[in-house]
Image (cartoon, helix red, strand yellow):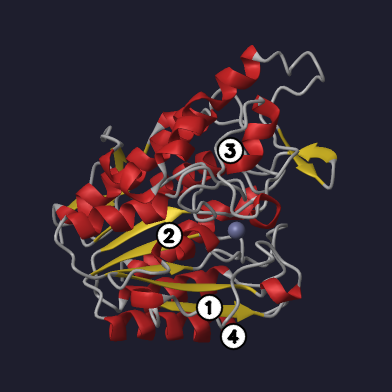
Amino acid sequence: MGSDAATGTSDAMIPFVWSDSCLNHDPAAEIWLGVRTPGTEVPDRIRVVRDELQAAGHKEIPAQSHSDDLLLRVHDPALVNFLTGAFQEWASGGYDVDPGQDRVVPYFFPSAEMMHGLPGGRMRATHARTGEFCYDTMTLIGPGTWLAARSAIDVALSAVDLVIAGAPAAFGACRPPGHHVTRASYGGSCYLNNAAVAAEALRSNGHAKVAVIDIDAHHGNGTQAIFYERSDVAFASVHVDPGAGWFPHAVGFADELGRNAGYGMNLNLPQSPGAGDASWLAAVERAAGFVANFGATALVLSLGVDAAIDDPESPLQITADGYERAGQIIGQLKLPTVSVLEGGYHLPSIGILVSATLRGLGG
Ligand SMILES: [Zn+2]
């Protein structure tokens, strides 16, 4: 492996993809149990990750723009259309003045049970329409949200391009994160599923079997749902047990194994609140073994670092050494690997944790 003495970068270090546009999303707030609380998925998250990766000598690659083709293979066009125009529609409706809400937020959720099989897509009021696509009140849309979310897709696809061109691994500094977004619904501070689009891109570039390993503290319910009935993309997730009261609450249990052609291609490894490195790493080992048995030829790593001991958003207790070891375990699969950023909210440590994981992954 060569190195560039002038910049301190080394060919052995995993390159990362960056887009300034991912800074444009400012959720401003979350509506938690009806109360407006400060947003936690803030632009500084990727700034600190970028600073740490630059300091460690990882090469920064600017994101390139990509067409909507792969995005629309993963997501329902109705969701993409809604997100594209949601803020403008909200602003035109004057909701910032009456009732004084400057972010797109749902209040009405037409559940499957309420609809009783009747057709959806017929709501006209903007304040009602939002609930057809958004499943929580925590995931607000502001003026820069669509640009950032769409740019995060370009970041993920540019990381795929690097791997297809021969890099052993690449990291996408995606923001907003994506793993909670299903084919047609968003939530959990996510709008478009960066990991799922990356997996679809690897499939379309000749990889017959692709796996996604998700080590974010929360279950990747969106990615699971997108691939749940498919035999060509396997999904394994290590996360805090939703049965212990954690987001996404309704999904992420160990008995969710996939359906139809996808049966047996889904593995959930829920962890008890308070779980530390030993239990978590044993689960990461199981996820890696599952991916090896599946016969994947390429991997997407949903790299959330909110399972860390200092993170305010989960009760897991993972150390920086644990993240580095997880990277090593996954790196030992020797698969072309695209990592994308998911959660991680403790600003003083998330850059260090991402860097530690990539150090392990890069061997
Ligand atoms: Zn998370």
Q: CA distance from mark 1 to mark 3?
A: 35 Å
Residue at numbered disc 2: 226
Which is nearer the N-term, disc 4 or disc 1? Answer: 1
Label 4 residue near ligand 1, CB within 8 Å = no
Q: Amino acid at mark 3?
A: Asp
Where's residue 182, x and y in %? 49, 54
Residue at 71% of width from left, 52% of height from top?
114
Quadrant of the image for the C terminus?
A: bottom left
- SS category of the residue bearing label 2: helix
The mark closer to the camera, 4 or 1, is: 1
Which residue has dot 3 on it? 44
Marks 2 and 3 sit apart, C-alpha to C-alpha, by 29 Å
Judge by depth and name the residue closer to the eye, 174 or 82: 82
Q: Dot 1: what SS?
A: loop
Q: Earlier in the sequence, mark 1 or mark 2?
A: 2
Q: Quadrant of ligand 1?
A: bottom right
Q: Residue at 69% x, 34% y: name it.
A: 105
Residue pointed to by mark 4: 279
The local secondary structure at tag 3 comes to helix
